[in-house]
Amino acid sequence: MEQAILQTVALTKSFDASPPVLKNITFSIKKGEVVVVIGPSGCGKSTFLRCLNLLEPIDSGEILLDGKEISSDKKNIHKYREKIGMVFQSYDLFPHKTVLENVMLAPVLVQKKKKEEVKKEAEALLDRVGLLEKKGMYPRQLSGGQKQRVAIVRTLMMHPEVLLLDEITAALDPEMVREVLQVVLELAREGMTMVIVTHEMDFAKAVADRVIFLDKGEIVEEETPQEFFNYPKTERAKKFLNTFHFEALEI
Amino acid sequence: MDFEFIFTYIPTYIEAAKLTIKIGACGIAGAFVVGIICSLIIELKIPVLRQLVQIYIELSRNTPLLIQLFFLYFGLPKVGIVLSSKACGVIGLIFLGGSYMAEGFRTGIENVPKIQRESAYSLGMTKKQTFWKIVMPQAVATSVPVFCANVIFLLKETSVFSAVALADLMYVTKDLIGLYYKTDEALMMLVVSYLVILLPISLVSSWIERRVRYAGFGNTGSV
Amino acid sequence: MQDSGIQVLFDGINFFRLLEGLWASIRIAFTSMLFSVVLGLFLGMVMTGKNKAIRFVCRVYLEVVRIMPQLVLLFLVYFGAAKHFGIDISGEMAAVLVFTFWGTAEMGDLVRSALISIPKHQYESGYSLGFSKIQLYLHIILPQTFRRLLPSAVSLLTRMVKTTSLVVLIGVVEVVKVGKQIIDASRFENPKAAIWVYGAIFLLYFAVCYPISKLSTVLEKRLKD
């Protein structure tokens, strides 16, 4: 059996004294796999990704990267994050740096790579997402879709083993959604391992190897996209999927 | 209006203005340094020092400069610490301004959105790298307008220096009114002097503020 | 053992006199604040109006207040007015006048920026519901600006209280002046009086201003949308 890259075992997480946002989540993803996490707002999807990237402390359970427990090792936290890339919903580019500086910063600073090498790679990647001519611009001069593509490139520059995408198109105007998702689809084709949280159901169908349906902090269904979208098993999943179909509303 | 009188005393005012500027500049530079150090102590959560800095900030912000000066100038000699008027002026201004600078800078740090730190962390940067490379540059830029406002505020505050016998603009004016009853002339020169010193600074700071707000790299995360 | 001199504060009615002086300072600050709030609200609304000339005059007014030290303004009113209008204006009156002149500008600017921060659609939806201009301001706009204004207004009050210390320089009998009198009176029997008296005044100001600034911070946190 192939070794999982990233795994959680019985992960539980709560904020303050309120009931847990994530209950007993056991999950794993293999190399080259694309897992899409969907579910109603407030079901804990984003928190789940943030836990995977060690941005949120967890209450109990384990997070394993390449079979090694990482959630309790605070000292090397940045080493692990280097291997787990994350792109956020809001455009979080560093506003005081140009596009090129944004994508070059981490490899130079964190991985101590040579500037010339990094620059070459950065330009190649920017070219691939169609933004090479924007390299000297500041983030505020870009559209939302362009910013988000730069944010993806910035993460790719670290050669992460897994990429976490947290509703990266949720804050975008509809016409910009496509240009960003296109980039993600290509990455999937190239075999990038990804955990994706999204509300774009068509995109989920197209990109996912596996769909996880999360509701009230629990994994309710875990299926192939064909199974899940066509023959959801639980009532909760059916109800959720129906909200995307207007004709399904009964008059 | 007695113009002969005015011309006679223009050099006196220039001297006084020079003194105001000199002490103001020293005090402001000192306040800037103290402010940065204090805000770093708070931000980096250094124990004990942090509590001391907090007490200092509250004391400094909630008492008038005049009283601080009186304490330094009239009070301290009674326990054997004698300071010159100039020293009192500079120390007083640093004591007052340091807390304002610190507060301004701390707000700048706080205003850097949390997501900025998080995305730096998610790229594998350490806390230190994130603070110096991501948070600090943005905090400095956003607090520039506050610094400018503080510079104007502190220069205005120098007007109380006459109370500790510094021969500044207020002191000269009071002298001339008392000696010659040339109230109008003295007051006019007083107002003009402050205009000459502060108007350019005020205009430059408005200009900087506009630049930082509209053309700077700001607009973080806004859609 | 050497005499520390602290008893100067407790001699006779000295401390009571200091408090009385402090009361004079507070009276000046609160009276000026009251006028400033009323006039400032008005000024703020005027400044958001369309008339260019009025707006220009307001800007000049604001700029004057922004760059002229309060002490200079006090001198202008106290010495200038006395000479020109022949009225022997009392120091306290001059102080209230100047502080109101200053406070109105600050309040006006706060009101103005609070007003323009209200999104345009708030005005539009108010009008589209058939509100009159007065109803609109009274029921929709001003209540929304209130949350933004209150913390800054309270912090302006702290600054006013602090600035009252200046009025001693134009001869008003307030806490600093009383302090000087006490020091002078006890010059021979208690040469160390100065450090205790000024120390006490320092702490008295702190005792008044600190709660007000804390209140401002608390309000700011509470009223954040």
Image: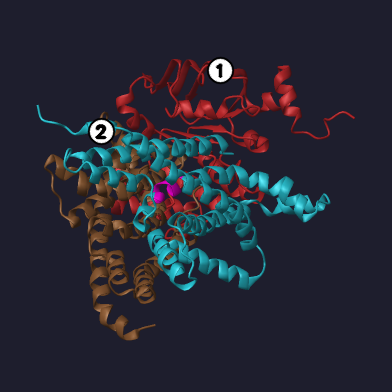
Chain colours: A red, B brown, C cyan
Query: In the shown orientation, is residue B217 left or right of residue C122?
Result: left
**In the rendered image, residues at marks 1 and 2 fall on the same chain:** no
Q: Secondary structure at mark 1?
A: loop
Q: Which of the labelled discs sits on residue A18, or is there none? A: 1
Indicate the chain on which mark 2 is placed. B
Q: Quadrant of residue B161?
A: bottom left
Q: Position of residue A60 (x, y in %)?
A: 45, 14
Query: Observer-nearest residue: C162 or A72?
Result: C162
Residue C125 visible at all: no
Q: Position of residue B56 (x, y in %)?
A: 30, 38
Asked whether residue A51 is drawn in magenta, I would say no
- Total labels: the figure holds 2
Please name the amino acid that badge 2 sits on. Answer: Leu
Q: Position of residue C26 (x, y in %)?
A: 45, 44
Q: Which of the labelled discs sits on residue A27, or is there none? A: none
**Residue on which the image places disc 2:** B49
Q: Which residue corresponds to the image point at 62% horizontal and 70% vertical from the top-left? A: C54
- Nearer the observer: mark 1 or 2; the answer is 2
Residue B4 vertical position relative to residue C104 in the rendered view, above or below: below
* Span highlighted in magenta in the image: C158-164
Q: Main secondary structure of the magenta part?
A: helix
Q: Which residue corresponds to the image point at 48% horizontal and 70% vertical from the top-left? A: C86
Please name the amino acid that badge 1 sits on. Answer: Ser
Q: Residue furthest right?
A: A251
CA gap between label 1 and label 2 equals 35 Å
Residue C93 vertical position relative to residue B139 in the rendered view, above or below: below
Indicate the chain on which mark 1 is placed. A
Query: Observer-nearest residue: B166 or C149?
Result: B166
Q: Secondary structure at mark 2?
A: helix
Asked whether residue C159 is drawn in magenta, I would say yes
Q: Quadrant of the N terminus of chain B?
A: bottom left
